[in-house]
Amino acid sequence: MTQTTRTPCQLYLISPLDVGGDFPARLEEAVTAAPVAAFQFRVKDIEQHEAARLAEPLQAICAAHEVAFIVNDDVALAKRLGADGIHLGQDDGDPREARRILGPDAQIGVTCHGSRHLAMEAGDAGADYVAFGAFFPTTTKTVEHRADPEILIWWQGMFELPCVAIGGITPDNAAGLVEAGADFIAVSGAVWNDPEGPAAAVKRFEKLLAG
C-alpha cells in the first residue's frame, strides 16, 4: 500500500473476530462488489495453527482479487502465512524487528492513535503506513484513544507516508475523514454488520470514495 503520490482514498477492511463459518463467502462477496485495497486478519486468543487454518481461505480470496492480506499483531503468523504485511499496535513489537523477520517487501502498519509523536516515530522506524483513530465510537474494540480529523490534515501537509483512518467509520461519517486526507479508511462493523450484507456496504463506501 506504499505510495509516492496521493491517490484517491481506498477501502481497508478489517475482519470481525469470528472468521469461521460462512465468513469466507462474505469476504468474497465484499471484495467482488467494489475495489478493496487491503484486508486485515484480526483474531484474538487463538492458537497459531488454528489461526493459520482460518486464514488460509481468506488469504486465497484476497490473492485472487489483488487485495493485500495483512495480519494483525502477530509477526510469527504473518511470517508463517507469507502474508503481504503486518499491522502492529503500540504494544505489538518494533517495526524494525518486523521488517527484519518479514523482509523488505512486507507492508508494515502501525497504530498511532491520535499522536503526532507516535506517527513520526513509526515513520522513522520504517513503517509503510500509520493508522490514526478511533475517530468515532466503535463496538469492534475498547477505545482508549480518540483522534481528531485535524491530525490527518497535519499529516498530509508534512509527510508522504500514507495514513489510515480507523474507528467507528461508516458511509455516513466517513466523508470528513476523506476530505481531511485519509489515504485509506479502515472499516469493520459497518461492512460485516450491514443488514443488507457486505456487498451493499462496500458499494456504499465505493460511492463515497468516488466523490
Image (spheres, rainbow, N blue to C red):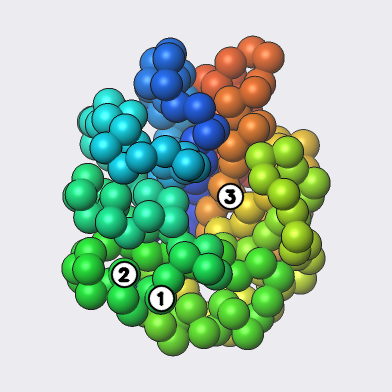
> Badge 2, how many Cα within 10 Å: few under 14, some, many 20+?
many
> Badge 3, how many Cα within 10 Å: few under 14, some, many 20+?
many
Tell me whether the residue at label 2 lies in contact with that at label 1, contact meaning CB atoms closer than 8 angstroms. Answer: yes
Nearer-N-terminus badge (3/1):
1
Give the label, 3 or 1, closer to the camera: 1
Residue nearest the observer in this picture, 156 or 23: 23
Q: Is residue 44 visible?
A: yes
**Helix, strand or loop under label 1:** loop
Write down the residue under mark 2.
98
**Helix, strand or loop under label 3:** strand
- Image quarter in which the C terminus is found: top right
Q: Amino acid at mark 3?
A: Ile
Write down the residue under mark 3.
185
- Based on the displayed image, in which of its 4 quarters is residue 102 positioned? bottom left
Tell me whether the residue at label 3 lies in contact with that at label 1, contact meaning CB atoms closer than 8 angstroms. Answer: no
Q: Position of residue 17 (x, y in %)?
A: 53, 34
Q: Position of residue 152 (x, y in %)?
A: 67, 69
| 167 left or right of 65 in image | right
Write down the residue under mark 1.
94
**Helix, strand or loop under label 2:** helix
